[in-house]
Image (cartoon, grey):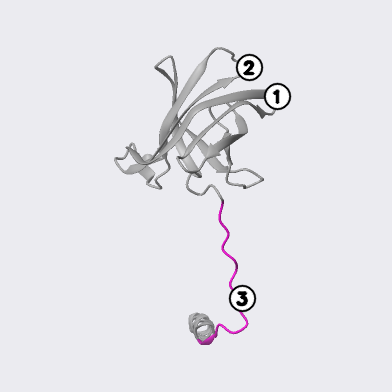
Amino acid sequence: MKIYLKTFLLSCLLVLACETEEGFEDFPVTTSSVIEMSGDYYVQTFLDGNLVLDYEFITISNSNADNGTEIQITDNHIWPFKAVVPANLGDLTFSGTNLISGAITVTITNGAIVKNGTTSTFGVTADMISFDGEFSDDPGNVYHFEGYKRTGFLEDEH
C-alpha cells in the first residue's frame, strides 16, 4: 500500500512540475485606496488620562466607496461601533463629527497614524495609531485610544 501511495504522489508531482503556464491567467491584484492606513491595531483606552481598558483589537479598512477620502473603523471589543471616518491620506490623519454607527453616533478627533512611530509590547517597531472618541450614548466623556499596528508576533497578541 505504501509503495502505491508513494508512486501516486510522485506521479502527481511530475505532472505538476511539467505543467506549463499556457492557459493560465494571472488574477488582477487589487488593493485598497487607503492601504497606508489599513490594518489591525491593538489599542489601549484612556479616560481623563487613566487607563480604563487595556489592549483591545480594532480594524482600519477602506469604506465601501474605497475612494481614498475615508476609512472605516471597526471595533468589536471596546465600544462596539463601525463608522466611516473622513481621512487625509497625505498626512495619515482622520476625524469626523456625528458619524453614524448603528443606533449611536461617534465623533472622532485627533486621529493619526504615525509610520514606525512606536514600539510594540514585544519591542518591535510598529505604526502608531491614536485618536479621541466621544459616543452619543456617553456624552461628555472623550476617550483616548492609542496603540500599535498588529505585528504578527505571538508575543504582541493580546
CB under 8 Å between discs 1 and 2: yes
Q: Earlier in the sequence, mark 1 or mark 2?
A: 1
Q: Mark 2 points at which residue?
A: 137
Query: Where does residue 2 sit, x and y in percent of width and height?
Result: 49, 80
- Mark 3 residue crowding within 10 angstroms, few (<14) / some (14–19) / many (20+): few
Q: Which residue lies furthest to the front in this view?
A: 90
Amino acid type at mark 3: Glu
- Mark 2 residue crowding within 10 angstroms, few (<14) / some (14–19) / many (20+): few
* Residue at x 50% of width, y 82% of height: 13
State which region is magenta: 18-32
Residue 130 left/right relative to 22: left
Residue in front for this viewpoint, 129 or 74 = 129
Numbered disc 1: secondary structure: loop
Q: Name the residue under label 3.
A: 25
Numbered disc 3: secondary structure: loop
Establish if 152 lies above or below 41. Answer: below
| Separation (CA) of disc 1 from disc 2 | 9 Å
- Magenta-colored stretch includes residue 21: yes
Establish if 98 lies above or below 59. Answer: above
Query: Where does residue 131 sit, x and y in percent of width and height?
Result: 47, 28
Q: In which quarter of the image is residue 70?
A: top right
Amino acid type at mark 1: Ala
Q: In which quarter of the image is residue 107?
A: top right
Establish if 94 lies above or below 28. Answer: above
* Residue at x 59% of width, y 13% of height: 139
Q: Name the residue under label 1.
A: 103
Amino acid type at mark 2: Asp
- Magenta-colored stretch includes residue 147: no
Q: Which residue lies furthest to the top in this view?
A: 140
